[in-house]
Amino acid sequence: GAVVSQHPSWVICKSGTSVKIECRSLDFQATTMFWYRQFPKQSLMLMATSNEGSKATYEQGVEKDKFLINHASLTLSTLTVTSAHPEDSSFYICSARVAGGIYEQFFGPGTRLTVL
Amino acid sequence: GDSVTQMEGPVTLSEEAFLTINCTYTATGYPSLFWYVQYPGEGLQLLLKATKADDKGSNKGFEATYRKETTSFHLEKGSVQVSDSAVYFCALSEVSGAGGTSYGKLTFGQGTILTVHP
């Protein structure tokens, strides 16, 4: 149980285009989802916290207008990278916290974004 | 702010060797501590956790003890297997909410790559 999927697993796009990444909790409801960014050989950095039905809370230094997050249902959150540039190339990981859960976040497998 | 520092990798061991991955933390409050593991091609999975001082988390032969006096949460395993090859992340989360009923964001260490050879 507690499986989180991400789609796509990898994407290559041209500079200036927008890319949408989906994060789904497959067998549980997630009131809170988190989006992380991971650079090579570096740790995961939290970008934003997404609560179902409300606006996402972004970490300091993360551009809200560039990384649009929507959490429209208890099983789906999306991250849209708008007007992507090569410096946005990274590994994006989502996690979901079970509704009413205390400790654990369940992580998706990640999405590799390459912007040419 | 909160931070987690992990032992630099990569770590390469032979099967059945003893493993230690060091982790120290800095926190303003009284955090809970976690070890996550990421196997190749998979998402992070919670390996073990400890929520208060002197607690020992354990799972799959791995152990870590919450040491408040040294602000450490070192991961150990007595005999590693090839299947333990993965990236290991130490993390902390501050407690928030009434009665400690909810947890805030996770702060991760930089990850340690472990490779175990037959």
Image (cartoon, coloured by chain):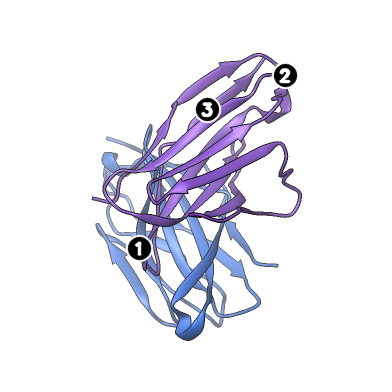
Chain colours: A purple, B blue
Give the image quarter of residue A104: bottom left
* Quadrant assignment for the C terminus of chain B: top left
The answer to which of A45 and A94 lies nearer the viewer is: A94
- Residue at the image position 52 percent from the left and 51 percent from the top: A34
Q: Visible in this render: residue B19?
A: no
Of labels 2 and 3, earlier in sequence is 2
- Residue at the image position 72 percent from the left and 46 percent from the top: A62
- In the rendered image of this protein, does residue B3 appear above or below residue A15? below
Gap in Å between the C-alphas at discs 2 and 1? 42 Å
- In the rendered image of this protein, does residue A9 appear above or below residue A24? above
**Residue type at mark 2?**
Gly
Image depth: mark 2 or mark 3 in front:
2
**Residue type at mark 1?**
Leu
Task: Say which chain tag 1 marks.
Answer: B
Position in image of residue A3 (x %, y %): 30, 45
Q: Visible in this render: residue A77?
A: yes
**Residue type at mark 3?**
Arg
Which residue is labeled 1 in the image? B48
Other-residue count near label 1 (Cα within 10 Å), few / some / many at <14 / 14–19 / ≥20? many
Which residue is labeled 2 in the image? A16
Task: Say which chain tag 3 marks.
Answer: A
Position in image of residue B111 (x %, y %): 52, 48
